[in-house]
Image (tube, rainbow, N blue to C red):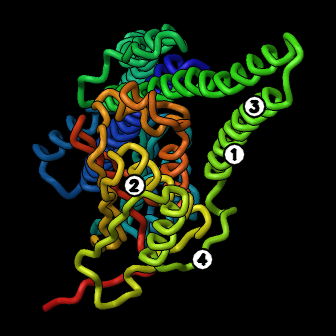
Amino acid sequence: MKLRYRLTLQFASIFALILVLFSLVIYYFTSLYRQDDFYKRIQQRAVVAAEYILEADEVSEQQRQQNLISFYHELPYEAVRVYNSDGRLIFSKGEGDLGGNPRILEKIKQEQQVQYEVDDRQVVGISYSDNQGNYSVLASSVDAYSLRKLQHLKVILIIGFLGSMVVVLIAGWAFSKQAMRPITKVVSEVEKISASDLHMRLSSARGKDEISHLAQTFNKMLDRLELAFEMQSTFVSNASHELRTPLTAMIGELEVALMKPRTSVEYERVLQSTLEDARLLTELSNGLLQIAQASIDSSKVKQTELRFDELVWTAREQALKRQLNARIDVDFENFPDDEDRLVVKGSEALLLIAVVNVFENAIKFSPPGQAIKSLIKVQGHEVVLEVKDQGLGISKEDLKHVFVPFFRADNVRSITGHGIGLPLAERILKLHKGQILIESILSEGTRVTIKLPQAYTFIPSRA
């Protein structure tokens, strides 16, 4: 069922329930008031009948005439019965069954007054004391006029309810259309967005209601999707280029070598060149494999507790083995009294790869012989490593893509590399709930910051 239909039915159902309860309350209290009011009138008629019948020989002629006049001001379908203390009927006027049985008469004696109904007839019984004894007087009447009015009220309420429901359904349909208009607009705009139109955004995101919040959330998702598509496109483009280059070189060398017979020295040179290109392809393949491994579920990675400073020193040694002429200075800032604050939890092999890649990147893009400065410090509940070089730097536009595999900035195309180191480091750190941040200025250098959560939770001491 469409949401518009559901809203209309819910709106109509709630209103119908309120209207039915309202109508029932009106009808019930009107009926109750009519019944009580008529009982009081019948009670007055019972007293008048008793005074006229039983007091006739005890009052003056003038009072007797007044009682007579009052007695003959009858109610519609009125009936009166008078019984003596022995239960014998001594006076009867009007037709109809008043239910004057011994049980009712005994109840009148005990309670002095009773009220009950016999079909449409309302009956009031009272006990009346006279100088000749105690009597039971039953007076009865049918409130025909008020019952007709009550019936008319019922018809009016039913017709009013049905008429109101028609109005409510029409109003609910219009209301649901108005309420659904922002959602319909959002759906219409979303249907226009495809993979080639990820730059489009929903126009309903400027308000402060729930629909605007939904549109804002959707726009943020589109931002992430657009960035992901752009990164994927960049990845495919750069990966294709990086993989094609050694393959093209290998094919070219081999085709040239096969064009005519060569000397053993020339064949050796071709094989050596092909071997270097094959090693380059192996490095690229290993990089892709490591990225895939760094993207697996963190729960599947075996983690142990390890000292972060020791990990950095180990990474420094490995980086220097690969770059014999490089220099890496490691310093400490606010070294903690409790060395457990330097302990992190993770895979030593993966974290070592991440830190080594950061060191190698800094060495690769720095002038020869330039020292790489690194700083270990503790900030809050994190252990931080800052690695700073004074190399070529990265432009603001290229900074957006540094974590895309195989991406290389235009100003470092001449430097050997594959664009795998930083993306791999970033995925490893995400796997360990850490983060890597990069700040760079062209021609001034780059600072890479690695942050990892401490293995233990420490409560700051209060002075």
Q: Is residue 245 above or below residue 404?
A: above
Residue at 54% x, 65% y: name it.
Answer: 318
Structural distance between the alpha carbons of marks 3 and 2:
138 Å
Q: Which mark's residue is nearer the viewer, 2 or 4?
A: 4
Tell me whether circle 3 and circle 2 mark residues in contact (CB < 8 Å): no
Within 10 Å of the Cα at label 1, are there few (<14), some (14-19), or many (20+) other Cα atoms? few
Q: Position of residue 138 (x, y in %)?
A: 42, 51
Asked whether residue 171 appears in the rendered view, the answer is: no
The first of marks 3 and 2 along the sequence is 2
Per the image, label 4 sits on a secondary structure element best described as strand
Q: Name the residue that disc number 2 marks.
A: 137
Per the image, label 1 sits on a secondary structure element best described as helix
Structural distance between the alpha carbons of marks 4 and 1:
25 Å
The first of marks 4 and 3 along the sequence is 3
| Residue type at the position of mark 3 | Arg
Per the image, label 2 sits on a secondary structure element best described as strand
Q: Is residue 265 above or below residue 179?
A: below
Q: Which mark is residue 304?
A: 4
Within 10 Å of the Cα at label 2, are there few (<14), some (14-19), or many (20+) other Cα atoms? many
Q: Position of residue 412 (x, y in %)?
A: 40, 31
Residue at 59% x, 61% y: name it.
Answer: 350
Q: Which mark is residue 286?
A: 1
Tell me whether circle 4 and circle 1 mark residues in contact (CB < 8 Å): no
| Residue type at the position of mark 4 | Thr
Structural distance between the alpha carbons of marks 4 and 3:
47 Å
| Residue type at the position of mark 2 | Val
